[in-house]
Every structure is written in C-alpha cells, then in structure tokens.
Amino acid sequence: MSRRHPDHLPQIVVIAKEPVPGRVKTRLTPPFSPEQAAVLAEAALRDSLRAVAAAPAGQRVLALDGLPGDWLPPGLVVVPQRGAGLDERLAAAFSDAHRLRPGPVVLIGMDTPQVTPALLEEAGAALTEHDAVYGPAADGGFWLLGLRRPDPALLLGVPMSAPETGKLQLDRLERAGLGVRLLPELTDVDTAADAATVAAQAPGSCFAAALRELGR
C-alpha cells in the first residue's frame, strides 16, 4: 500500500447508475432478463466499490445516477451525476470531485468488477509523474481515466459508447500535450460473453458469484 500522505493521494471516482431493472446492462438482455441484468450490475458495482475502498485515495467519490442502496460501503462521498451525454457526465464528475478536493482525480465506471486495488494504486501513482493515466477497454473504449489537472475540455465532445471512443479520447489527451501512462487492457461487461470472460478472470468476485447463482 502507498505510504504517501492522504493529502497527496488522488481522489478515486466511480461513475455509476443505480442498478434498477431496465436501466442497467440492457445489452445483457437477452439472454438475461432485465431483473437478472440488474443483479449482475449490482454485483459489478459492489466489486468496483470494494476495490476503490481498499485502494489508497485522498477521497473516494461515487457520481451516481439514481439513489444509493445497501451496496454502498461507508466512506464514499456521493454526488449526483450532471449532464446529458456520457461525455458531459464524465466531465462533470471530474469537475465536481475536483471542486470538493482540488488535486488529481482517477475515474472508473461500474463495468469492470475484476479491477483490483493494486491497479487503482498504480493509476494514482502514475499521476505523480504523468499528466494522465489511461486504461483501455477491450471493446474500444476505456475503463479508467486519471487526470493530474482535471479539465472538462479534455472530455467534452468525445463520442462515447462507440468502437473508436478510446482512440478518440486518447488522441484528445495527446493533442492537449499531456504525457499519458497506459494501464493494462480490461474487458468491460457489456454482453453475456463479456460476463463469462470477466467472471473467469475474477472467480472470487461478487460478480462471478452472481453469475453462478443465475446458472451461467
């Protein structure tokens, strides 16, 4: 674990939706029902939040679309998501966290339950020497973005949820002259095939347990 003083550690932000049937993980239906997809989404969110809770951080923030549930561990500051498109919501999450506690910010979503505290610590440490840290996702997006100096202009207007999202976001960072540290690629849980892959990578996770309980 990091020996840096908490004041010198980055914030870690999770941007997430309340796991309500029909509103989350809609690409899992079919083969899963909306209720089953919500169960898997909640399990992934629990895993993500537990990893954040165990990683060194100056502050831990949940940028939430919806209401907190019993899946929320203690110690996280909850702020509502703002904005229309995902680019606006990501930019707002960075801005709101930075407003609460100025300094570097590392942001992840709720789609990578295999994320570990060690990966998050690596991301935070990278911001001591780099302007940005970037975790590519197997679907062409990204699972983590960290900025030493958060700036909405680095995100606004980047097309999200598209095969080229990651490339365009990375291009935006590099065109801004930022030095970027790359992290290992992870698989986002979007499809049933993704769910099986991720569960196999993290067999002890809440997500893997939920998938087994659903008979998959």
Image: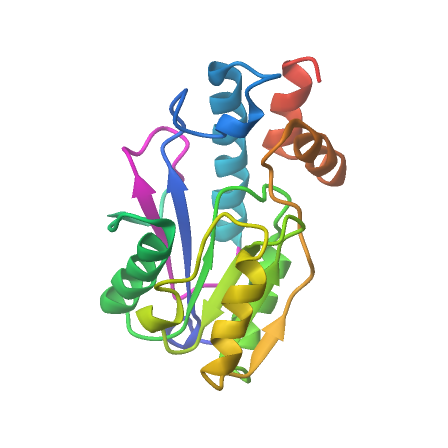
Left/right placement of residue 11 relative to residue 146 reads left
Left/right placement of residue 173 relative to residue 7 reads right
List x then y, in percent, for residue 61.
35, 53
- Give me the residue at 33% from left, 61% from top: 91
Left/right placement of residue 115 relative to residue 53 reads right
Locate residue 3: give its quadrant.
Answer: bottom right
Locate residue 2: give its quadrant.
Answer: bottom right
On the rendered image, what quadrant is the C terminus found in? top right
In the displayed structure, would residue 84 be above or below residue 147? above
In the displayed structure, would residue 143 be above or below residue 33? below
Q: Nearer the viewer, residue 38 or 203?
A: 38
Name the dominant secondary structure of the magenta segment. loop
Q: Nearer the viewer, residue 126 or 160?
A: 160
Regarding residue 40, the answer to whether it shows in the image is yes
Locate residue 199: give its quadrant.
Answer: top right
Colour mapping used in the image? rainbow
Give the magenta part as a residue range: 55-73
In the displayed structure, would residue 166 be above or below residue 22? below
Q: Is residue 69 magenta?
A: yes
List x then y, in percent, for residue 193.
71, 31
Q: How many marks?
A: 0
List x then y, in percent, for residue 38.
47, 23
On the rendered image, what quadrant is the N terminus found in? bottom right
Q: Is residue 208 magenta?
A: no
List x then y, in percent, for residue 186.
66, 51
Regarding residue 3, the answer to whether it shows in the image is no
Q: Nearer the viewer, residue 56 or 210?
A: 210
